[in-house]
Amino acid sequence: MRLLIIRHADPDYGNNTITPAGHREAEALAHRLAGCGLTRIYSSPLGRAQDTAGYTAERTGLQVETEPWLEELHELRMDEGPAPGYMAWDLHGHLIRKDPPRAVDGTLWQAPGLSNPQFQEEVERVGCDSDRFLEALGYHREGGRYRVLESSREQIAVFCHNGLALTWLAHLLALPVLLMWSGFWLSPSSVTTVLFDERNHDWATPRCLGVGDVSHLYAAGLPLQPAGIKGNFT
């Protein structure tokens, strides 16, 4: 099974949709995905994800299945610390990575801005929802690997959001979420591919084949949009 984890196209946050540039991105993405042999499409309930997914649904003839757990993690807004008003995945990377062991062992959760216990609860909730979602697709998580209940060769597109996707990827790949947040950014309409690598009949291990691919934008002559980047993008 392959998961194509897709961030929505360029967002119009105020109107819960995508911008004119985002519509062009979504159309280019649909053109690319139409040849990928998709078998299912899932989406966050938020308008910017739904509107992005709609182009691919129209091109493929597949129905969009809405999964509420794929909604962006609005509860992770920081009210204190060095970046008040930012989301937790936007905390300055130099603060997280100045002391990598703390970022890996989890004690950095006690740092200003991250000490809200609800943050860790939200991250754990994403993991639990992911496990439920994947078990329904035939993969039961045990530790950091997945027992194969029913082997699958499906190609599944999941339209969601930057923070949710980074948090989910940390869970799938068994990586520290704080390093995932500070080390990666998923551009609007980008595609991250995760293969459930089955080396035998019993176990599958998620393997990332590509992060944040935007080849469809280059093919269509479209620029990369910076939504979510807080620093010197240009």
Image (spheres, grey):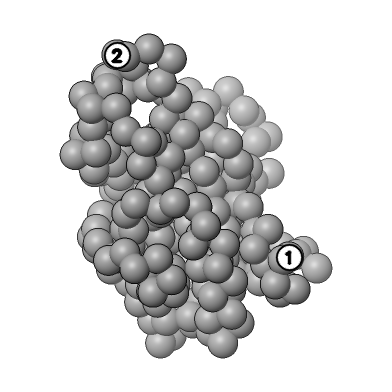
Asked whether residue 178 is in view, the answer is no
Residue flagged by tag 2: what amino acid is it? Asp
Residue 2 coordinates in the image, percent (x, y): 43, 40
Q: In screen coordinates, is 218 left or right of 187?
A: right
Residue 205 coordinates in the image, percent (x, y): 42, 23
> Along the line of sight, which residue is nearer the eye, 116 or 7?
7
Check disc 1 and report the residue beneath it: 218
Q: Residue furthest right?
A: 234
Residue 22 coordinates in the image, percent (x, y): 55, 78
Check disc 2 and report the residue beneath it: 202
> Along the line of sight, which residue is nearer the eye, 124 or 49?
49
Picture quadrant where residue 191 is located: bottom right
Q: In screen coordinates, is 188 left or right of 114?
A: right
Q: Is residue 152 above or below residue 145?
A: below
Label 1 – label 2 distance at C-alpha: 40 Å
Quadrant assignment for the C terminus: bottom right
Q: In screen coordinates, is 141 left or right of 186?
A: left
Quadrant assignment for the N terminus: top left
Picture quadrant where residue 221 is located: bottom right
Marks 1 and 2 close (CB-CB < 8 Å):
no
**Residue in the image at 43% along x and 71% along y:** 59
Q: Is residue 8 above or below residue 121?
A: below
> Along the line of sight, which residue is nearer the eye, 176 or 152?
152
